[in-house]
Image: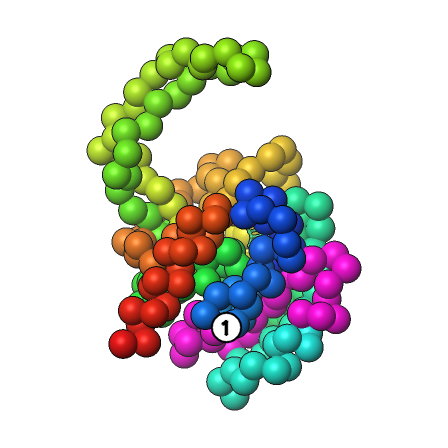
Amino acid sequence: ARTAAVIPAAGRGVRLGPGAPKALRVLGGMPMLIHAVHAMADSRAVSLVVVVAPPDGAPEVRSLLDAHALPERTDVVVVPGGESRQESVKLGLDALPPGYDIVLVHDAARPLVPVDTVDAVIEAVRDGAPAVVPALPLADTVKQVEPAAPGEPEPVVATPDRSLLRAVQTPQGFDRATLVRAHETVRGDVTDDASMVEQLGLTVVTVPGHEEAFKVTRPLDMVLAEAVLARRRH
Ligand code: C5P
């Protein structure tokens, strides 16, 4: 079965501070999105990458991609994205040609995921899992709070057992038909694609995640990403 990767890259990146859409911010001399595309294309199994660009930014993204060589075995398609991440992923899925039975969904905001993590996700889907997520144990204890009025302290209502919690990353890998069905039937806000498959009643499995697959969200994450790239160059 052939494997395609959909990269939602249409977010504004508000938490990163003012500037270009997050995926187009530069890391080690190259836009974050280009790192993310290379991270997918590094896997020999991936032969198509669908980039979901900011709604008005598809031509700009196309020319950026044309300026950065990819392995010959990899095709890249660019489509405009939507209002939410979920909508952007759906628009990417709609652009997939027939023949790709395994689909990865990978955040442009995780530019440094190592190829071994990508391959482990693909392998687990090939082995029959309908949905696979890279996951890591948590360093911090997590509290559940009750919403409070602005400026008021939030009361803690629960402390879930940390040993059973995982932080999940991307790429998340899917049997294509399952992911398409999830996007057609599940409504309501979600923050990842695997949770939509959970809502279908199917079992999502984990593979080990990687520290370097962290999501670039806040300004400090840019500092960390630059440091990881500098270390790779040595
Ligand atoms: O906002 P968050 O960090 O969860 O975004 C994760 C990924 O989803 C990013 O790569 C972002 O560009 C993408 N996204 C998108 N379309 C949106 C919002 C976010 O493709 N409307």
The C terminus - image quarter: bottom left
Picture coordinates of residue 221, whole percent (x, y): 42, 51
Quadrant of the image occupied by residue 229:
bottom left
Q: Give left or right: position of 68 versus 154.
A: right
Residue in view at x 45 percent, y 14 percent: 154
Q: Does 132 lie within the magenta span?
A: no
Quadrant of the image occupied by residue 143:
top left
Residue at the limit of the structure toward the left, as seen here? 163
Q: Does 43 lie within the magenta span?
A: yes
Picture coordinates of residue 195, whole percent (x, y): 48, 40
Residue in view at x 56 percent, y 12 percent: 149
Q: Is residue 148 depicted above or below 43 in this figure? A: above
Q: Is residue 149 visible?
A: yes
Residue pointed to by mark 1:
29
Secondary structure at badge 1 equals loop
Stretch of the chain drawn in magenta: 38-61
Q: Give left or right: position of 61 versus 118.
A: right
Picture coordinates of residue 53, whole percent (x, y): 67, 61
Residue in view at x 61 percent, y 82 percent: 67
Q: In the image shown, does 156 or 106 lie closer to the viewer?
A: 156
